[in-house]
Structures are given as structure tokens and as C-alpha cells.
């Protein structure tokens, strides 16, 4: 009777599960699907970040104007510098004296009245909302951690140092996606145009 109640033994072939390799076409399809999901998640994250930054949109607009002006400074300085080189190629002493004063004044005005204020506006306009966003994200993460079950912190990968590092990295990564990159890119685009 005990032998009749025992469960039948599983065949050896069923016990050893082997992975079936995917064809190249299936691998490409799987990779394309994963890429689409990753792009959707990235777009969702960026939309959430910009949603959190809406109250600071005026700072961002001011930063954008500063970035445009800052990007236009360097082509103007290049034209002034080319004028200086042309002046030095001229052999007339009177022309050089007259032009050197004009070009030095232009260079000083460009640096003093355009470069410094536009850079300050760019960095302040994108820096303040970025810092406020970072603070918001850190506070949200910290609140979530405080509401986490106590057993979560007993795991070795969730020690005090790891959690603190995670809070700092999350906020810094979000700041990298915020307006500072937009300011740099806008400035570079205006410089190249």
C-alpha cells in the first residue's frame, strides 16, 4: 500500500529544463520591443520632471534668454578679434592707433555688458529651478523611505550608506535631465549658428 501512494517519479528529460536559443530575428524583435519600452519610460520620466518644474518656468525662460545671449557673445567677439588682426596687418600708424582704441572699447563692452550678464542670467535661470527640483525630489524620496516597512532596512543592500547614496544619486540624475542641459545646448547652438 505505501508504494501505491507514492508519487510517480518524474522522467529525467522533464527534470532538466534546457533553454532554447532564440533566432537572430527573434532576438532583434525582442531588443526592439525592449528599446520601445525604455523610450516610453524615459519620455514618461522627462514629462514628470518638467511637470514638477512648472512653477519655476519664468526662471527657465530667463535662463533661455541668457543662454541665447551667451551663445551669441562668442561670434561677436570673433568678429572683433578678426578686426584686431586686420588692424595689425595695416602698416599705417595713425589707422592702428585709431582702430586699437575702438576695438579695445568694443571688446571691453562686449565682455562687460553682454558676456557677464548673459552668463549670470543663464546660470541663475537654470540653476535655481534645478536646485529647487533637486530639493523636491530628495524630500519625496526621503518621505517614501520614512514610510517604508522596517524590514526593508534589515537587508544588507539597504543599509544607511546605500540609502543615503541612492537619495543623492536620484536627485543628481534628475538635475542632469532638468534645464541646465537645455541651457548648455542652447548656448552651443547659438554659438554655432
Image (tube, grey):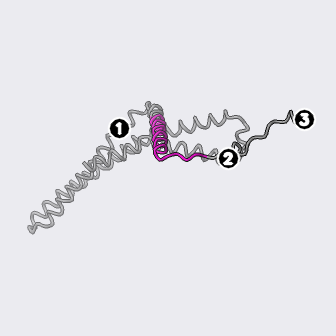
Q: Secondary structure at mark 3?
A: helix
Q: Earlier in the sequence, mark 3 or mark 2?
A: 3
Q: Kindly indicate the quadrant of the structure image that contains residue 125.
A: top left
Q: Which residues are magenta?
A: 19-46
Q: Which residue is mark 2?
A: 157
Q: Secondary structure at mark 1?
A: helix
- Label 2 packing within 10 angstroms: few (<14), some (14-19), many (20+): few
- Please give the name of the residue rendered at 35% of the width and 38% of the height, measured from the top-left corner: 62
Q: CA distance from mark 3 to mark 2?
A: 48 Å
Q: Position of residue 114 (x, y in %)?
A: 28, 47
Q: Position of residue 54 (x, y in %)?
A: 43, 31
- Camera-nearest residue between 71 and 116: 71
Q: CA distance from mark 3 to mark 1?
A: 84 Å
Q: CA distance from mark 2 to mark 1?
A: 43 Å
Residue 159 in view, yes or no: no
- As drawn, 156 above or below 45: below
Residue 29 lies in the magenta-colored region: yes
Q: Which residue is mark 1?
A: 62
Q: Which residue is mark 3?
A: 2
- Please give the name of the residue rendered at 69% of the width and 45% of the height, measured from the top-left corner: 13
Q: Position of residue 158 (x, y in %)?
A: 67, 44
Amino acid at each position: 500500500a505505501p508504494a501505491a501512494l507514492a508519487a510517480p517519479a518524474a522522467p529525467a528529460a522533464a527534470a532538466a529544463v534546457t533553454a532554447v536559443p532564440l533566432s537572430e530575428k527573434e532576438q532583434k524583435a525582442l531588443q526592439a520591443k525592449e528599446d520601445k519600452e525604455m523610450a516610453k519610460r524615459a519620455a514618461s520620466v522627462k514629462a514628470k520632471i518638467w511637470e514638477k518644474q512648472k512653477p519655476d518656468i519664468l526662471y527657465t525662460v530667463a535662463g533661455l534668454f541668457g543662454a541665447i545671449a551667451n551663445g551669441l557673445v562668442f561670434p561677436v567677439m570673433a568678429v572683433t578679434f578678426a578686426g584686431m588682426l586686420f588692424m595689425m596687418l595695416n602698416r599705417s600708424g595713425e589707422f592702428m592707433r585709431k582702430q586699437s582704441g575702438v576695438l579695445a572699447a568694443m571688446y571691453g563692452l562686449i565682455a562687460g555688458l553682454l558676456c557677464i550678464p548673459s552668463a549670470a542670467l543663464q546660470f541663475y535661470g537654470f540653476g535655481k529651478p534645478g536646485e529647487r527640483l533637486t530639493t523636491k525630489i530628495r524630500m519625496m524620496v526621503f518621505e517614501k523611505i520614512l514610510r517604508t516597512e522596517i524590514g526593508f532596512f534589515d537587508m544588507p543592500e539597504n543599509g544607511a550608506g546605500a540609502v543615503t547614496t541612492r537619495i543623492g544619486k536620484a536627485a543628481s540624475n534628475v538635475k542632469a535631465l532638468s534645464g541646465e542641459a537645455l541651457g548648455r545646448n542652447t548656448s552651443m547652438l547659438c554659438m554655432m549658428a
